[in-house]
């Protein structure tokens, strides 16, 4: 598989396909690392496939070879060690930016990617520019050092780099840059943030219906996806429509929205948006085949709050104590909303349970459920509204 990935190095679609295939086969494909990556994809000592440096945008063979060759003198022990050993004739700012965005420097301790792009003030250069300038001055000083009386070069201690204090990139930003420089997501997927929504609201994933819509004829299909492309066009009658490419964890799917329906959901269909789609598999007008009829679209981030009517929380009696009650009370107070919540305390040993209901307890489903996920021992169930609100 490493050889197959390397062979398709210049075809992003095939690379993405084969990495997905590796995951289905249980083979880990690790992101790039300046201390382990070779030119191409290869198998490391742990029997995992490590990302090749030349698979990163703006990192050519010359730059990759310089990193690998210098590494023969010893692994890079820190960010300082890496920066001051760089061959600055082979590695420029764009190359270093791409390495950082792809996560190739994540192995160094106590750093995060956002720091390299941080600016103290808008009119100041980014930290990465300061780093490269610092490295250039250090190397020039080292090269121009004079021989001592004992015939040895003067030793230079590596200057300590003071990293700027700033917030790390959020997951979506990190994944966006990974895809920008490699063509796909390395450390996760944007939909990972919505596991709660996907597990509780979706009836299908794209691969369930993509190749056999007829088998789902007349059935409601609810699935989550990220908008990867949205191309607005005009037909012969000058009516607007949009060709949309949807993507989930495993597959992509293309749909077209016409006129009023497209204009209704246009604000949700920007590339990068994570959406929940309610659809039906139906026959085309000529009856020759089936198509996916879109009934409703909404943001995944709002889906729980717009569709869940009630949350029922189940609490085993052995863990019921004052501390848990305080946790639940705080979660309710911090997540006010419009849906109801009830509690069921049950005794697993005697198979007895007691329900507590209060229509005045109204919660924000999404926030409250995420707080519940942090509490060991309890679980919950959502009750969906009979009808979707049009704002979903």
Image (cartoon, rainbow, N blue to C red):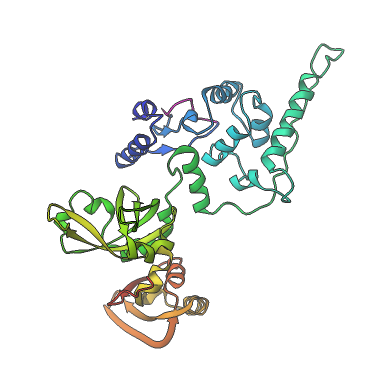
Majority secondary structure of magenta residues: loop
On the question of residue 247 being in view, the answer is no
For the point 51% across and 80% down, the residue is 333
Number of labels in the image equals 0
Residue 205: % across, % down: 28, 55
Residue at 74% across / 38% down in the picture? 160
State the quadrant of the N terminus: top left
Q: Is residue 122 above or below residue 132?
A: below
Residue 37 is one of the magenta-drawn residues: yes
Image x and y of residue 233, in percent: 37, 52
Q: Is residue 158 left or right of residue 391?
A: right
Q: Is residue 332 above or below residue 193?
A: below
Residue occupying the far left of the picture? 287
- Residue 173 seen in this snapshot: yes
The quarter of the picture where the C terminus appears is bottom left
Q: Range of the magenta residues? A: 35-43
Quadrant of the rendered image containing residue 5: top left
Which x, y percent locates residue 19? 36, 38
């Amino acid at each position: 598989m490493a050889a197959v990935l390397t062979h398709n190095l210049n075809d992003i679609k095939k690379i993405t396909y084969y990495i997905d295939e590796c995951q289905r086969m249980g083979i880990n494909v690790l992101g790039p690392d300046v201390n382990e990556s070779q030119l191409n994809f290869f198998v490391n000592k742990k029997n995992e496939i490590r990302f090749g440096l030349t698979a990163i945008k703006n990192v050519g063979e010359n730059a990759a070879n310089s990193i690998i060759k210098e590494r023969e003198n010893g692994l890079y022990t820190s960010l300082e060690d890496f920066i001051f050993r760089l061959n600055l004739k082979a590695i420029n700012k764009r190359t270093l930016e791409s390495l950082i965005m792809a996560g190739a420097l994540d192995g160094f301790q106590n750093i995060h990617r956002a720091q390299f792009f941080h600016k103290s003030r808008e009119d100041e250069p980014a930290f990465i520019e300061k780093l490269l300038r610092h490295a250039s001055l250090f190397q020039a000083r080292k090269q121009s050092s004079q021989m001592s009386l004992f015939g040895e070069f003067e030793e230079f201690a590596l200057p300590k780099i003071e990293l700027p204090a700033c917030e790390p990139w959020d997951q979506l930003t990190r994944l966006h840059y990974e895809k920008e420089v490699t063509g796909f997501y390395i450390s996760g997927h944007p939909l990972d943030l919505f596991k709660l929504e996907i597990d509780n609201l979706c009836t299908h994933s794209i691969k369930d219906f993509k190749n056999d819509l007829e088998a789902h004829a007349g059935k409601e299909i609810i699935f989550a996806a990220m908008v990867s492309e949205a191309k607005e066009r005009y037909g012969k009658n000058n009516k607007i429509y949009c060709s949309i490419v949807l993507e989930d964890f495993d597959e992509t799917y293309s749909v077209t929205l016409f006129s009023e329906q497209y204009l209704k959901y246009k604000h949700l269909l920007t590339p990068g948006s994570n959406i929940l789609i309610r659809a039906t598999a139906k026959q085309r007008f000529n009856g020759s085949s089936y198509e996916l009829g879109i009934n409703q679209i909404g943001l995944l981030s709002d889906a729980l709050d717009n569709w869940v009517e009630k949350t029922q929380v189940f609490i085993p009696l052995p863990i019921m104590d004052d501390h848990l009650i305080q946790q639940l009370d705080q979660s309710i107070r911090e997540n006010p909303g419009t849906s109801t919540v009830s509690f069921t305390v049950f005794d697993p040993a005697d198979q007895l349970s007691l329900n507590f209901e209060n229509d005045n307890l109204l919660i924000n489903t999404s926030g409250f459920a995420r707080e519940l996920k942090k509490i060991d021992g309890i679980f919950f169930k959502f009750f969906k509204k009979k009808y979707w609100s049009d704002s979903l």
